[in-house]
Amino acid sequence: EGFDAMYAYLKDRNYTEGLFVFVVMVVSATRPVLKSVTSIVNFMAAGLSKVLPFKGAICFYFVVMAIVPILGSFITEPAAITLAALILADKLFSQEITKKLKYVTLATLFVNVSIGGTLTNFAAPPILMVAGTWEWSNSFMFTTFGWKAIIACCLTTFVAIAMFYKELSGVETLRTDFVANVS
């Protein structure tokens, strides 16, 4: 229909949600936020490895793949996916691991972030759209969906770990600090 019709169409759209997601992802990828979250992940993984008899990257993998997506309920899903992906890129994907592990990791991460945002009534865009209308409070979200999401995130992560236990056991993730690699 021409330039004028295209311009009128684009001018009539609302880009608020897309811009919000973009800003959240950019802010969560900044050096201070990434360094802080990486330190927390390393601390939690080290603590978990003292309690559980796993070696290599297993505890680290569990924290990044289950705990970070669950935190998406509080820091938003775009922030959770950005942080988890950047941490995995530096600590795991930069090493000699199989493509199969990479694909399973990404698929599991997408699923976990999607369901991990259901603990609160404000983190997942689909829930945000209906929470006010249907009067879904944070307590309703947690008691109805949240606890199930926590179990599902942990279960899918355990399945991925079981599938690649041998490979993950041979990977060392505490070898670098992400910020040291960013110039």
Image (cartoon, grey):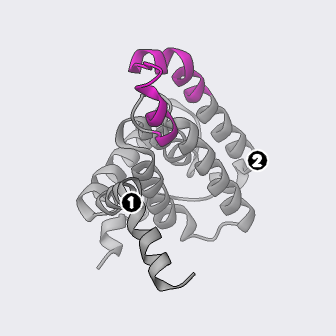
Q: Residue furthest bottom?
A: 2
From the viewer's perspective, is the residue at label 1 or at label 2 nearer? 1
Residue occupying image coordinates x 37% and y 61%: 22
Question: How far apart in space, not on screen, are marks 1 and 2 (Cα)?
Answer: 41 Å
Q: Residue furthest left?
A: 32
Q: Is residue 169 left or right of residue 138?
A: right
Front one among 141 and 172: 141
Q: Quadrant of the C terminus?
A: bottom left
Residue occupying image coordinates x 42% and y 42%: 46
Is residue 146 located in the magenta-colored stretch of the structure?
yes
Identify whether 175 is placed above or below 181. above
Front one among 139 and 89: 139
Is residue 168 located in the magenta-colored stretch of the structure?
no
The residue that mark 2 highlights is: 163
User: Residue 166 at what x, y percent from top left?
Assistant: 72, 52
Q: Tell me which segment is drawn in magenta.
A: 124-151
Residue occupying image coordinates x 36% and y 65%: 178
